[in-house]
Image (spheres, grey):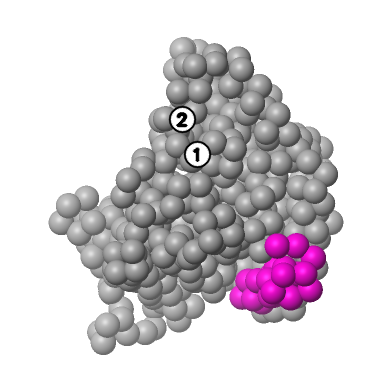
């Protein structure tokens, strides 16, 4: 199933790309990433050129990326068809294939997900307004120091974006100016995915060329594994276009916002279609909305996470946020529009409270670590002096081109003393509650997202361990001895 996408993609990366020693020092940057004047032919150490000398190399550099780049766009189109044109079940799609043939079904999926003018206009307005809010004033904060000495800068205005985009979306609906119905994202979803799919593939090609010809910083260039892998993985770590950070805008300001507002729109679509409020859909939308409010409060923390500091802006990262997130992360709520959740208020509220506890604990854990970093370890955690490991690493100074020693503090108190990624267990608690609220008690399709996320986060914890061992060496081994569990205390 497609829930193994992250594991398969990571296996491709692990074989074809050497572990990056990404830097996380908190010193003020010597120079913003956008001011670097790199050699466009320079490839960072996160990608070591090598010839495909075995089948494993060929799979990692060509076959694996091709499989993912072919199957995932198709899956997104099938999912859009299944939830908006069929009855929100995979079994009906399969039955259709047996009854009328795969070719006939393929035609149905193709024509139902063709880009439409209304979907294109919707996306244009959506992103235009998000681009205006992108320049909202705020405090400038910095990401980690990269391997080649660049440190990206970001304006911390995520909450302003979240609030303003919500008000603009609701204000333009029948609840405000009446320009569209609140279920507009559901009504135009197949055409939207069609537009995003084509745009995403073309945009990744643009980023591929930009990373080779006109990169925004020194962490750019070919991996040495050929066009297919470079297109899949990307040729630049921190691309910027006209002053806009591509990762921040695509990952946060588009994909997360679409997910957040889609919950509202799909809950409205459920009400319009069935003439009553579905407790499961409504509480699922509220829980996801609150989770994403938490995300925007913590947005700068995300810009320092493995998604941003390791993964380059290629098909895997950028197409994934442009198409996979709107398609898969909204799947459970969307499926419940076609087939109601079947939950009453008591059962739905019980699941909602458990999921909301996961959202709250996830925020608490992230906030705890963020405050620890900003205080440089000079704080108490749960009433006691923070315990941590001081880890050292080396990074290139972008101005002198010489290697320098830096340090990071690895928190081993509070939630971070119980497991190195305990926040993932809280996030999975929320995700599985959304799947159940979306109808997962009687259908498998709404459970696809939480199953996918489980695979993704378990493997991400392993990726983070590999990265930190390469970066910190023995210091991280000491940290692992102090905090031996990855995600679940005493189990894993």
Name which of mark 2 and mark 1 comes first in the sequence. Answer: 1
Q: Which residue lies furthest to the bottom in this view?
A: 383
Distance Cα–Cα, label 2 vs label 1: 7 Å
Residue 16 x/y as whole percent = 51, 28
Left or right: 113 in relation to 392: right
Residue for badge 1: 87
Q: CB of mark 2 within 8 Å of CB of mark 1?
A: yes
Q: Can residue 239 be seen in this view?
A: yes
Viewer-side residue, 292 vs 402: 292
Question: Label 1: how many residues lie within 10 Å, few (<14), some (14-19) or many (20+)?
Answer: some
141 above or below 36? below
71 above or below 299? above
- Residue at the spot x=32%, y=85% of the render? 380
Q: Which mark is residue 92?
A: 2
Q: Which segment did they paint magenta? A: 158-181
Instruction: Indicate yes or no whether the magenta region holds residue 167.
Output: yes
187 above or below 70? below
Q: Which image quarter: residue 126?
A: bottom right
């Amino acid at each position: 199933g497609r829930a193994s996408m992250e594991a398969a993609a990571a296996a491709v990366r692990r074989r074809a790309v050497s572990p990056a020693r990404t830097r996380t020092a908190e010193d003020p940057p010597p120079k913003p990433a956008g001011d670097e004047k790199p050699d466009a032919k320079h490839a960072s150490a996160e990608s070591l050129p090598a010839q495909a000398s075995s089948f494993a190399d060929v799979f990692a550099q060509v076959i694996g990326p091709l499989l993912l780049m072919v199957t995932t766009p198709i899956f997104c189109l099938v999912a859009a068809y299944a939830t908006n044109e069929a009855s929100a079940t995979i079994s009906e799609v399969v039955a259709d294939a047996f009854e009328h043939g795969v070719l006939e079904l393929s035609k149905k999926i193709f024509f139902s997900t063709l880009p439409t003018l209304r979907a294109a206009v919707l996306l244009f307005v959506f992103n235009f307004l998000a681009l205006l809010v992108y320049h909202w004033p705020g405090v400038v904060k910095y990401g980690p120091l990269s391997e080649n000495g660049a440190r990206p800068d970001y304006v911390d205005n995520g909450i302003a974006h979240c609030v303003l985009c919500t008000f603009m979306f609701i204000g333009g609906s029948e609840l405000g100016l009446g320009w569209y119905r609140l279920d507009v994202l559901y009504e135009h979803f197949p055409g939207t995915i069609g537009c995003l799919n084509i745009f995403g593939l073309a945009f990744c090609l643009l980023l591929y060329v930009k990373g080779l010809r006109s990169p925004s910083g020194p962490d750019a260039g070919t991996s040495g594994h050929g066009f297919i892998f470079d297109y899949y993985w990307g040729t630049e770590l921190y691309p910027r276009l006209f002053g806009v950070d591509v990762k921040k805008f695509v990952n946060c300001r588009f994909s997360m916002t679409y997910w957040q507002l889609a919950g509202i729109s799909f809950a409205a679509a459920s009400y319009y279609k069935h003439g009553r409020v579905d407790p499961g859909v409504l509480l699922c939308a509220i829980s996801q909305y609150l989770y994403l409010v938490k995300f925007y409060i913590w947005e700068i923390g995300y810009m320092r996470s493995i998604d941003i500091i390791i993964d380059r802006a290629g098909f895997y990262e950028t197409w994934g946020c442009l198409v996979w997130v709107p398609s898969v992360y909204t799947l459970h709520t969307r499926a419940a529009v076609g087939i109601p959740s079947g939950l009453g208020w008591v059962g739905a509220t019980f699941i909602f409270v458990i999921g909301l506890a996961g959202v709250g604990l996830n925020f608490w854990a992230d906030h705890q670590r963020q405050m620890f970093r900003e205080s440089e370890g000079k704080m108490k955690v749960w009433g006691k002096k923070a315990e941590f490991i001081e880890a050292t690493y080396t990074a290139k100074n972008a101005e002198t081109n010489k290697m320098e020693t830096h340090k990071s503090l690895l928190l081993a108190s509070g939630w971070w003393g119980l497991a190195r990624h305990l926040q993932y267990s809280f996030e999975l608690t929320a995700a599985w509650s959304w799947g159940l609220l979306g109808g997962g008690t009687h259908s498998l399709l709404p459970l696809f997202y939480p199953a996918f996320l489980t695979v993704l986060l378990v493997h991400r914890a392993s990726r983070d361990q590999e990265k930190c061992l390469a970066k910190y060496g023995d210091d991280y081994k000491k940290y692992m001895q102090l905090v031996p569990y990855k995600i679940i205390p005493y189990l894993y």
